Amino acid sequence: MPSLLILCEYATLNGGERSMLSTLPGIARAGYEITVAAPTAGPLAVALRDRGVEVVPFSGHDMHGVRLPIEVRRRRLAEILRAHRPALLHANSLAMGRLAGPVAAELGVPSISHLRDIVTLSRQYVADLNRQDRLLAVSEATRRFHVAQGITADKIHVLYNGVDTEQFHPAPPTFFLHDELGIPRDWLLLATIGQISLRKGHDVAATALSLLRDLLPSPASRLREDGRGAGGEGFLFAWLVIGQRYSDKAESREFERQLRELTQNKLPGRVFFLGDRGDIARILPELALLVHPARQEPLGRVLLEAAVAGRAIVATDVGGTREMFPSEIDAAALVPPDDPLSMARAIGDLLCDPQRRLRLGENARQRITSLFTIERAVAGLLGHYERVVATA
């Protein structure tokens, strides 16, 4: 049974970690013995242990949360590799790929790394990644970006993430969130799901939603689910911000502070910060619309999940998003990044047109269930594993 060591940087469960977790059953069925090197406290370790996966302690920070020098982190990784001698090392992120590249090459351990980010890299960073045997980009946009930075083109291949079509699927709303949050059931629910950060663009969505009244056909009307004005004190919706801020940098704290201040001033009584939730599959059917205002997005996992759940989506046309939702199939409303007015118009148009919301959701579901399944992702990943091990 070949041994696989997966290297993870963080203890959290964000898109990259959830994408990795979704492939583990298929990898195990293919005969791999899986071990994960990761922080041993936190949601990721809990999820791994629940799946019966061994977690080897690995952290890039000291007991006070201070990031360790890269030489120290590489020595720790080398110790793990010498102790376990895996047939293959899979670094689950760009940062871990950079860390592991020289270590795996020097120890003769076949290695592969996922590139799940579109960020500018230094020349040394690129050189370290190029020491990996193979690199997997989550979208063609991600691949093009990194090849332009100097990643060896022959090393980098596109492998789309997959989504669990059994866990995520259409379902009639139950209004449990309305009841949980004390929101009237005739209000429409919009949500933005993901880490609170400048890159995710929550400020753009907040500004867009504050513009909605001026863009709707009758600013003083209340829009019902059937799209007809019904009189009242304004367009009734609630915006759910699902996720939390993980970065403790001063600029990240300030971004969240300003976001909360903006929503309090511009959208009083309409915004609910829910933090991390473990029931996204249950939440998605409750939504009229998913709003994804990211400034950059290699391949947004929540977009896959919302699409499979049949939800209408307004998203920025960045990174790999158009690869998921090409314009010719009319599966999502894509708008330019950093453009609150365009986003507000797209949101307003969809909220006024429940039939188009339904059509977008159906088209998105058909697209994603045909091309972005877990089965396709696992099969592709196993193929890359086999090629790397065979040529070692």
Image (tube, rainbow, N blue to C red):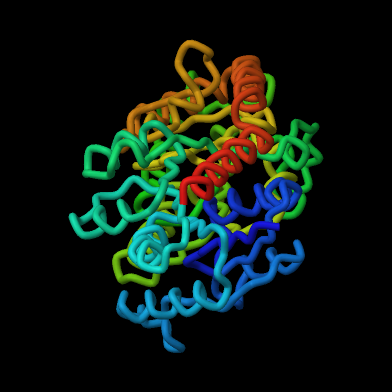
Give coordinates of residue 11: x percent, y percent.
Answer: 55, 69
15 vs 176, left or right, is: left
For residue 354, which quarter of the picture?
top right
Depth order, front residue of 199/151: 151
Give coordinates of residue 43: x percent, y percent.
Answer: 63, 68
Depth order, front residue of 345/320: 320
Query: Residue furthest toward the top?
Result: 328
The number of numbered badges drawn on the structure is 0
Is residue 178 visible in the rendered image? The answer is no
For residue 32, which quarter of the picture?
bottom right
Whether residue 225 is situated above or below residue 175 in the rendered picture: above
Q: Which residue appears at 56% of the width and 56% of the height?
A: 17
Whether residue 1 is situated above or below residue 388 in the rendered picture: below
Give coordinates of residue 105: x percent, y percent.
Answer: 37, 62
Q: Quadrant of the N terminus?
A: bottom right
Query: Residue furthest toward the left?
Result: 123
4 vs 278, left or right, is: left
Query: Residue furthest toward the front?
Result: 391
Give coordinates of residue 244: x percent, y percent.
Answer: 51, 61
Is residue 50 visible in the rendered image? The answer is yes
Whether residue 229 is situated above or below residue 213 in the rendered picture: above
Q: Which residue appears at 60% of the width and 58% of the height?
A: 274
312 vs 48, left or right, is: left
Q: Which residue appears at 64% of the width and 70% of the height?
A: 45
